[in-house]
Amino acid sequence: MEYVHGAAGIFSPEQMEREKLAAEQRRNEAWESLKARAEDIRIIDFHTHIFPDRIAKGALHALAEESQTIPFTAATAESLRESMREAGVDLSIVLPVVTHADKTGKINLSAAKTNETDTGILSFAGIHPGVEDPKKELKFAKALGLKGVKLHPDYYRMSFDSPETMRIIDLAAEMDMIILTHAGKDIGLYPPTCCPVDAIKRVIREIHPPKLVLAHMGGWNDWDEVLEKLAGEDVYFDTAFSIGDIHWMDQPKHGFHQLSDEAFVKLVYAVGTDRVLFATDCPWAEQIDYVNRIKAMPFTPEEKQAIFAGNAKRLLGL
């Protein structure tokens, strides 16, 4: 795989190398800018999604039809920033989902491009277990300055504890990358559940990745099992798409529901307030609604500060 920005064949090798170094410098400067204002960052949304402007409308429509839910933004960078301004979110982490192995490198180049300016949006990498050389892909993502990698076993139709996925998790952990995975059922792809609690337990037991983040409070619509089996584990939990109301297009699917505020508070205390990351899954949940809901919950000011930003800053190295 060539490390290029721009259309292949347009630049000479020397020009490509200069552009590579210039892009790296832009990313480093943007990261330093983010670090410089870290003290003023009060809310970090650790789980959001956007698409390039040219495909956002079509991609969002397809996903909405698949899940039968109504999105809250247009799933573009500008619509995310508008949502952030309204909600008072200072930094959003974008999580690319790679559905085809051969698109991994291109998606990660696009993610790195997002990170060349400090706009309050920071993208992670994506990967697919079907890639020919996962170590090479992860090294490439690391070289691009991407701080973490998103996994979505349901899109791979492969269990979280499959040999292919565990290989990626092990490699990413060796490279000190954050690993964030969809966990539990998927509103658009269920059944089956490709990241069940028992698979997560096996990965923790056999690999123990130090920077593993379980989306949707450890397992969407599997929260009783999360409470029983994952409380006390040395992992992080994001709050994405786990509270509030699901905005269905028509009738609820499979009896899916969100946590009540009371059940959410109980689960947060069970897993530890120092292990919970504020997240929404925007555009599928409304950032301002999540901010207001958690502000109104009976956590202490110190616990709210940790959930909203402190834990994420520690994990990101901010």
Image (tube, rainbow, N blue to C red):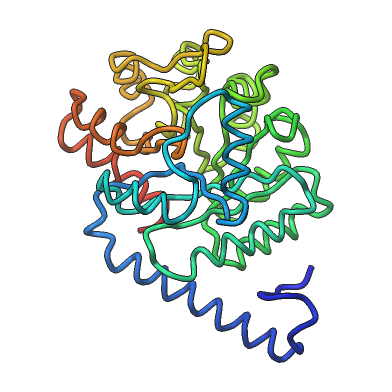
> Where on the picture, by quarter, is residue 280?
top left
**Which residue is drawn at the image coordinates 50% and 33% (left, top)?**
215
122 sits to left or right of 168 = left
In this view, 56 is above or below 289: below
> Which sits in the foreground, 238 or 285?
285
What percent of the width, then of the height, locates residue 107?
66, 57
> Where on the picture, by quarter, is residue 14?
bottom right
What percent of the width, then of the height, locates residue 46?
42, 44
Extreme residue toward the top, this view? 255
What percent of the width, then of the height, locates residue 88?
25, 47
Extreme residue toward the right, this view? 132
Number of labels in the image equals 0
**Which residue is drawn at the image coordinates 60% and 56% (left, top)?**
54
> Which sits in the foreground, 245 or 219?
245
Quarter containing the C terminus? bottom left
Extreme residue toward the left, this view? 301
Quarter containing the N terminus? bottom right
**Which residue is drawn at the image coordinates 59% and 83% (left, top)?**
21
What percent of the width, then of the height, locates residue 90?
30, 53
